[in-house]
Image (cartoon, rainbow, N blue to C red):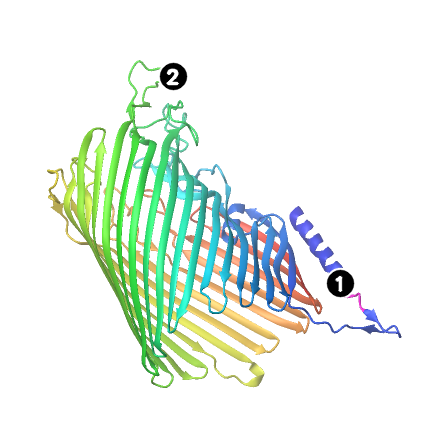
C-alpha cells in the first residue's frame, strides 16, 4: 500500500497546487476579483502520475493491461505548434510515461512551397508472464525461472520531403527499429512427474525466449505528374540482424529422489542468428483518362539474401557450452553445432487496375496481379546425439545414463519457385434510392515446384521433388439499406474456398522408421468457408424529455470445413514417386462460429449519457480425433470450444460547465475448461474478469484541466489452477495546461 499512499499524496499535492494557481486572479481598484478573458490556446501539455497495487500474479496483470506495477508518470500528452516566418510551421507532438517505458515524440517542420523535415522516436514496453502450464492431478506447477519478463520495441526515424511546385515530389525516409528483451514461449518442456501411471508425460514446464533484433530501413520515392498521369519510382533497402534464443527445460524436476538416478532433467538453448539484406525497386503509374475512368499499373522487383547460423545445445543449465559435463542426457537428445546456411529469394510482381464509372450510380473495378518467385537455400550443420553408457560405470558414467557421441555432418539444399495469378472484379450500384448493392469476386491460381535434397555424413539421401497447385476463390455479395433517416441495415455473405494439391515426383531415399511421420505426405487439402453477417443501426425518435437513444446490433455466422488426403510413402528407388498407401480423404475439422453483439447508447438529457455493450460468441471446432484410445476412458483430443461473452456499461454526467463525472464496468466470462488430465494436458479457457472504474474531470481555469481516475481489476483463471489470478487497484491523475 506504500505505492498507493505515495500516489495519493502526489495527486493531493498536484490538486492543491492547481487550486492555488487557479485562485491567483486579478482585482480591480475596488478590490473586486476580475476574471481574465484569455484564449485557452492551441498548444497544450498534460502531466500525469499514477500507479498500481497488485495482489496475485503481477506479471499477468501487466501483460493484459500494459501497465507497470509501480508508480509511473510523466508527460501524458504534448502538442506545440509555432509559425516560423510567413511560410514555416514547427509542430511537436508526443508523450513520455516513465516506468511504463512508453515514449513517443514527433517533430515536424514544414515550409510551404518547399517541403518538410520530420523526425521521431517511439519506444514502448510489453510485459509477459513467465508461467507455464498447470496439471490438475496433484496440482503440478513449475515455478518459472523468470516470473516477469519485458520486451522493449522502438523506432527512431527521419524523413525529408520535397514539395515544390512544378518539381517532382521526392521523399527520403530512414528508420532504425529494435526489439530487445525477453518474452515467454508456449513451446513448453516435458515432465513425467504428473502422478499418472500410464503415459504420464505432459508438456507444462515454462519456456522463454531471449530477443535481440535490429532493422535498418532506407527508402526513396519520387512522383512526377505528366498531364493526366502520375508516375512514381521508388526503392527500399533493409538490413536486419537477429540473435534470438529459445530456452526450454526437458524432464523438468526429474532428479533423484523423485526418479531413479541419474535423472532426466536437462536444459536446451536453441540459438537462432540471421543476417538479412533485402532490396525492392518499384514503379507505379496512375492515369485519369477522364472523371469516370482511371487506370493504374505497378511493377516491383525484390531480392532477399540471408545468412543463418545457430546452435542447439543441451546442458545442465541454460546457455551451456557443448561438452560441459551433464549426467542426465537421454536417448535421441539431438543437438546442433556449427549451423551455417544461406537463402536467396527473387520476386517479380506486376499488377494493373481499372476503375470505371459508366453511369452516375454504377462503379466497376477490375484488378490483375502476377507474381513470380524463386527461392534457393542451403545449409550444413553437425548433428549431435547420444548413446547409452556401458560398463565400467562410474560417477561420471552412471548406469542408466547416456553420453555424447561423435557428431554427424548433415547438409541440405532446396529450391522452389511459383507463378501466381490473382484477379478481382467488383460492381457497386446505388441507382435505387436508399439502397447500395455490391458484388465482388476474387480468384487466385498458383503453380509451383519444390525440390529438397539431403546428405547425411557421406550418404546421399536423394531428392524430394513435387509440383504444387493452389486455387482460391472468394465470392461476396452485400447490400446497404437506409429506409429512414434513423435506420440503416447492412448485410453481407461470402463464400471462400481454397484447394491445395501436391504431386510427388520423387521421394527421399532413406527408408522410413516404423511409426515415423517423416514419410507421411499431404496430397491435397480443401478449405471451405461460408460467412454471413448483418448489422442494424437504429436511432428511434423519442419524446423530447427522454433525450436520444441509439441501438447497434450485429450478428455473424461462420461455418468452415477442412478436408485432407494423405499418403504414406515407403522406401523406394530414388526418382520414383509416391508408391505407398494412399489414404481416403478425411474431414479433419468443422468450425462453427456465432457472434452476437449489441450496443445501446442513451442520452436522457444533454448532461447525462448511458452506454451498454454486450457480445456473445459461440465458437466450436469439431475434429474426427475426439474418440477414446484404448484403454483410455475419455478422448485425448477434444473438440475445441472458444465460447465467451462480454458485457460493459458506462455512464457520464456533466455536473456543470467545469466538471464531468464518468463511471464504467465490464465483465468477461469464458467457460471452456474441460479436465481430461488422465489422458492429456487440459486446455480450454475458463476465466472471469471484472473491471470497474470512475473518473472526475475538473476545469480549474480556462486553460487548466485536472482529471482523477480510479480502476479496480479482478481476474480468476481456472486453466492455470489460479496461478494467473490477480486483484489490482490503479489510481491516476493528469493535469492539462493549454497555452
Mark 2 burial class by Cα count in 10 Å: few <14, some 14-19, many 20+: few
**Highlighted magenta segment, given as a residue range:** 20-25
For the point 42% across and 72% down, the residue is 553
Instruction: From the top left corner, tell me how far across and down residue 533 is, in percent.
Output: 35, 70
Q: Is residue 305 above or below residue 192?
A: below
Q: Which residue is mark 2?
A: 395
* Residue 57 seen anywhere in this rendered image of the structure: no
Local secondary structure at mark 1: helix
Q: Is residue 700 above or below residue 243?
A: below
Quadrant of the drawing holding the C terminus = bottom right
Cα distance in 3D space between marks 1 and 2: 76 Å
Q: Of residues 291 and 463, which is closer to you in this image? A: 291
Q: Is residue 390 above or below residue 50?
A: above
Q: Are marks 1 and 2 in contact (CB under 8 Å)?
A: no
Instruction: From the top left corner, tell me how far across and down residue 291 is, in percent.
Output: 37, 79
Q: Is residue 258 left or right of residue 86?
A: left
Q: Is residue 682 above or below residue 412?
A: below
Task: Identify the mark at residue 19; answer none if there is no mark.
Answer: 1
Mark 1 burial class by Cα count in 10 Å: few <14, some 14-19, many 20+: some
* Residue 225 seen anywhere in this rendered image of the structure: yes
Instruction: From the top left corner, tell me how far across and down residue 386 is, in percent.
Output: 30, 26
Residue lying at the far top of the rendered structure? 392
For the point 27% across and 39% down, the residue is 378
Residue lying at the far front of the rendered structure? 166
Q: Is residue 23 magenta?
A: yes
Q: How many marks?
A: 2
Task: Identify the mark at residue 622; answer none if there is no mark.
Answer: none
For the point 54% across and 63% down, the residue is 665
Give the image quarter of residue 415: top left
Instruction: From the top left corner, tell me how far across and down residue 388 is, in percent.
Output: 28, 23
For the point 16% across and 35% down, the residue is 511
Amino acid at each position: 500500500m506504500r505505492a498507493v499512499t505515495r500516489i495519493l499524496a502526489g495527486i493531493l499535492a498536484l490538486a492543491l497546487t492547481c487550486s492555488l494557481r487557479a485562485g491567483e486572479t486579478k482585482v480591480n481598484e475596488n478590490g473586486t476579483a476580475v476574471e481574465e478573458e484569455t484564449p485557452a490556446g492551441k498548444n497544450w501539455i498534460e502531466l500525469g502520475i499514477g500507479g498500481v497495487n497488485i495482489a496475485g500474479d503481477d506479471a499477468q496483470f501487466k501483460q493484459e493491461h500494459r501497465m507497470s506495477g509501480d508508480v509511473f508518470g510523466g508527460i501524458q500528452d504534448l502538442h506545440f505548434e509555432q509559425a516560423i516566418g510567413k511560410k514555416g510551421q514547427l509542430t511537436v507532438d508526443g508523450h513520455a510515461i516513465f516506468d511504463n517505458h512508453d515514449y513517443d515524440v514527433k517533430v515536424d517542420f514544414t515550409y510551404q512551397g518547399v517541403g518538410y523535415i520530420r523526425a521521431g522516436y517511439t519506444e514502448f514496453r510489453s510485459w509477459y508472464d513467465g508461467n507455464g502450464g498447470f496439471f490438475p492431478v496433484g496440482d503440478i506447477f513449475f515455478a518459472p525461472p523468470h516470473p516477469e519478463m519485458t520486451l522493449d520495441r522502438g523506432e527512431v526515424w527521419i524523413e525529408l520531403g520535397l514539395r515544390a511546385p512544378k518539381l517532382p515530389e521526392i521523399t527520403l525516409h530512414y528508420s532504425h527499429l529494435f526489439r530487445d528483451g525477453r518474452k515467454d514461449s508456449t513451446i513448453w518442456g516435458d515432465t513425467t512427474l504428473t502422478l499418472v501411471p500410464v503415459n504420464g508425460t505432459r508438456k507444462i514446464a515454462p519456456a522463454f525466449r531471449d530477443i535481440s533484433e535490429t532493422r535498418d530501413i532506407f527508402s526513396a520515392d519520387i512522383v512526377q505528374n505528366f498531364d493526366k498521369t502520375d508516375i512514381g519510382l521508388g526503392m527500399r533497402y533493409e538490413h536486419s540482424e537477429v540473435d534470438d534464443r529459445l530456452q526450454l527445460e526437458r524432464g523438468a524436476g526429474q532428479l533423484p529422489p523423485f526418479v531413479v538416478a541419474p535423472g532426466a532433467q536437462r536444459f536446451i538453448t536453441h540459438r537462432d542468428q540471421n543476417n538479412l539484406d533485402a532490396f525492392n525497386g518499384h514503379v507505379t503509374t496512375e492515369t485519369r483518362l477522364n472523371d469516370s475512368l482511371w487506370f493504374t499499373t505497378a511493377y516491383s522487383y525484390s531480392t532477399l539474401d540471408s545468412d543463418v547460423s545457430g546452435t542447439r545445445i543441451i546442458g545442465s543449465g541454460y546457455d551451456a557450452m557443448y561438452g560441459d559435463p551433464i549426467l542426465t542426457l537421454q536417448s535421441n537428445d539431438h543437438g546442433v553445432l556449427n549451423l551455417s546456411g544461406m537463402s536467396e529469394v527473387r520476386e517479380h510482381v506486376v499488377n494493373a487496375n481499372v476503375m470505371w464509372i459508366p453511369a452516375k450510380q454504377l462503379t466497376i473495378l477490375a484488378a490483375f496481379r502476377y507474381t513470380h518467385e524463386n527461392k534457393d537455400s542451403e545449409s550444413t550443420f553437425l548433428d549431435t546425439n547420444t548413446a547409452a553408457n556401458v560398463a565400467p560405470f562410474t560417477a561420471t558414467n552412471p548406469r542408466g545414463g547416456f553420453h555424447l557421441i561423435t557428431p554427424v555432418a548433415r547438409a541440405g539444399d532446396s529450391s522452389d519457385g511459383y507463378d501466381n495469378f490473382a484477379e478481382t472484379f467488383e460492381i457497386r450500384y446505388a441507382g435505387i434510392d436508399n439502397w447500395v448493392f455490391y458484388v465482388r469476386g476474387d480468384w487466385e491460381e498458383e503453380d509451383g515446384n519444390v525440390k529438397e535434397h539431403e546428405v547425411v555424413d557421406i550418404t546421399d539421401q536423394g531428392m524430394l521433388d513435387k509440383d504444387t497447385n493452389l486455387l482460391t476463390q472468394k465470392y461476396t455479395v452485400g447490400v446497404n439499406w437506409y429506409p429512414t433517416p434513423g435506420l440503416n441495415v447492412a448485410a453481407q455473405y461470402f463464400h471462400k474456398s481454397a484447394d491445395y494439391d501436391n504431386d510427388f515426383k520423387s521421394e527421399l531415399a532413406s527408408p522410413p522408421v516404423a511409426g515415423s511421420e517423416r514419410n507421411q505426405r499431404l496430397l491435397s487439402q480443401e478449405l471451405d468457408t461460408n460467412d454471413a453477417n448483418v448489422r442494424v443501426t437504429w436511432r428511434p425518435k423519442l419524446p423530447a424529455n427522454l433525450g436520444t437513444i441509439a441501438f447497434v446490433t450485429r450478428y455473424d455466422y461462420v461455418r468452415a470445413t477442412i478436408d485432407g488426403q494423405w499418403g504414406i510413402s515407403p522406401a523406394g528407388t530414388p526418382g520414383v514417386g509416391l508408391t505407398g498407401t494412399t489414404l481416403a480423404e478425411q474431414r479433419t475439422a468443422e468450425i462453427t462460429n456465432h457472434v452476437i453483439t449489441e450496443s445501446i447508447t442513451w442520452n436522457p438529457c444533454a448532461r447525462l449519457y448511458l452506454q451498454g455493450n454486450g457480445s456473445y460468441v459461440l465458437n466450436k471446432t469439431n475434429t474426427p480425433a475426439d474418440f477414446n484410445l484404448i484403454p483410455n476412458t475419455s478422448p485425448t483430443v477434444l473438440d475445441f470450444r472458444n465460447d465467451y461473452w462480454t458485457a460493459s456499461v458506462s455512464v457520464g454526467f456533466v455536473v456543470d460547465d467545469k466538471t464531468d463525472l464518468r463511471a464504467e464496468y465490464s465483465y468477461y466470462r469464458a467457460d471452456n475448461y474441460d479436465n481430461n488430465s488422465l489422458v492429456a494436458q487440459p486446455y480450454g479457457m475458463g476465466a472471469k474478469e471484472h473491471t470497474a472504474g470512475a473518473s472526475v474531470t475538473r476545469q480549474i481555469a480556462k486553460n487548466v484541466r485536472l482529471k482523477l481516475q480510479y480502476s479496480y481489476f479482478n481476474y480468476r483463471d481456472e486453466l492455470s489452477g489460479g496461478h494467473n489470478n490477480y486483484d489490482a487497484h490503479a489510481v491516476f491523475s493528469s493535469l492539462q495546461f493549454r497555452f
